[in-house]
Image (cartoon, grey):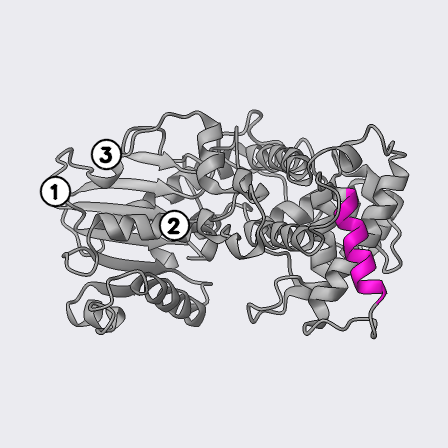
Amino acid sequence: MTNQLIILGNGFDVACGLSSSYTDFFRDRYSLHKWNPAEGANLTDEDTKLAKHMLPNDGSINADFWKIDNPNFWDLVFLTDCQYGYNYDDGHDSATTWHDVETLIQQILDSLIENQAANSDGPELWTISDWISSCINRLTYCDAPFPIENHSQTQFEFSLARCLETYLDYRKVSPTGDAYYSSNAFITLKSELNNLEQAFSKYLSQVCVFAKHPGQYAGSHASWREKTTRNEQEKYRYTANKLLNLIKGVDNQAGDSTSILSFNYTTPFGKNETTRNIHGTTDNAIFGIDPALTNVDDLGISPDGRKIFTKDFRVLELHTNHRYEKILHPDGHKEHTLDSIKVFGHSLGDADYSYFRTLFDDVDLYDGDTALIFLYTAGANVTELNNNVAQLIGKYALTLPEEKQQINLITKLTLEGRLNIRYIPESEFKTETYLK
């Protein structure tokens, strides 16, 4: 009997028919059809137009913004990013799509702490108001309107700071009593992020099979998504289990011990000791950043305010007390390592790198026998997947002892038959009709 670990990302739920992506969430959250169907009909199909409607490029905020459920700082961040694209170094046309939430959170926190370091002779308590002033002063009194090397980054920061000024003015906050003026910036943004997480949890509970009111969409009237039915929800669970069985069967025999580490918030397989939703469920979804990306010793900032946003800190806040012995050793024997790690629907991005590094260390990827199998289905960008796999393994290889870095890890795994990218036909797990 062999042991296998299956890692699932949001691409799994999307493949099974759920509208669970960040794009789906933001389009639902900012849909003008909720308040102004006639005007919204012309905007919801084009994200950038929608963002510009909410935040015109003059520092103002449209009245429709305040109709969002509990609007906050992070809504301004994502709407501004949709226009200018702060993730300017990833090679994507970021001004035309909604960004990966955790990547953008990381970049905002980096900007916050870098501005704090640049103003080390300023106030000891660094607030959101201080950050706004720092951004505007730095970008206004320059030799050119946008002098920083990357134009989109500068536009983003400047536009966001101006919108935040308007935001504070609209809220009629008191400089002596409001958190934006009187509290640590990171604590304030953490509280605001909690509000966004609650909104995301609420959204997911409406679209997944475990909704409190199956078959109904209580909060959305957007025309781009039809109302779900109980039958559709059951179809998702049926499809998810069918796809999972196909993944299990790749290069394995029936009866193998399998564990599941899901980066999703849905639980179509139930809850047991061999299945973990590492970032919470639809009841308590969390966003976080990779703890490896918070080293700022060179900036001289201590303590690092970003620590409370790291995924390890956020997972601790869930108080789930999950044990992971059965995830790493699904057959129950600690002396038995994983024979294969299979990944489906995960972006392999930096935000989750620490998890992969820990797993690779645990199985002794370089000298061990564990195989890595990355799976995809119709609609996946295969070129992007290949690049992401190469980047992930290449990044991990840099952590190996110097003598082992002399051998290309990707080449080694490939020659040993321990690195594969496989296709699963959509026709094998999806059907046009579903009979309960």
Q: How many marks?
A: 3
Residue at 23% x, 40% y: name it: 328
Crowding around mark 3 (Cα neighbors within 10 Å: few <14, some 14 to 19, many 20+) is many
Q: Which quarter of the figure has residue 155?
A: bottom right
Asked whether 342 falls inside the magenta stretch, the response is no
In this rendering, which labeled residue sits more in front, label 2 or label 1? 2
Tell me if mark 2 has few (under 14), some (14-19) or many (20+) residues whose alpha carbon lies within 10 angstroms of its own: some
- Closer to the eye: label 3 or 2: 2
Secondary structure type for disc 2: helix
Q: Which residue is mark 1?
A: 336
Please report contact status of discs 2 and 1: CB closer than 8 Å, yes or no: no
Q: Which residue is mark 3?
A: 326
Q: Secondary structure at mark 3?
A: helix
| Viewer-closest of 18 and 134 | 134
The residue drawn where x is 67% and y is 39% is 189
In this rendering, position of residue 149 left or right of residue 229: right
Percent coordinates x, y for residue 313 in the rendering: 47, 36
Q: Residues within 10 Å of mark 1 (few under 14, many from 20)?
A: some
Image x and y of residue 49, in percent: 78, 60
Q: Is residue 171 left or right of residue 209?
A: right
Q: Nearer the viewer, residue 372 or 120?
A: 120
Q: CA distance from mark 2 to mark 1?
A: 23 Å
The numbered mark, 3 or 1, whose residue comes first in the sequence reads 3
Say which quadrant the C terminus sits in.
top left
Q: Which residue is mark 2?
A: 354
Observer-nearest of 3 and 426? 3
Q: Position of residue 34 (x, y in %)?
A: 78, 40
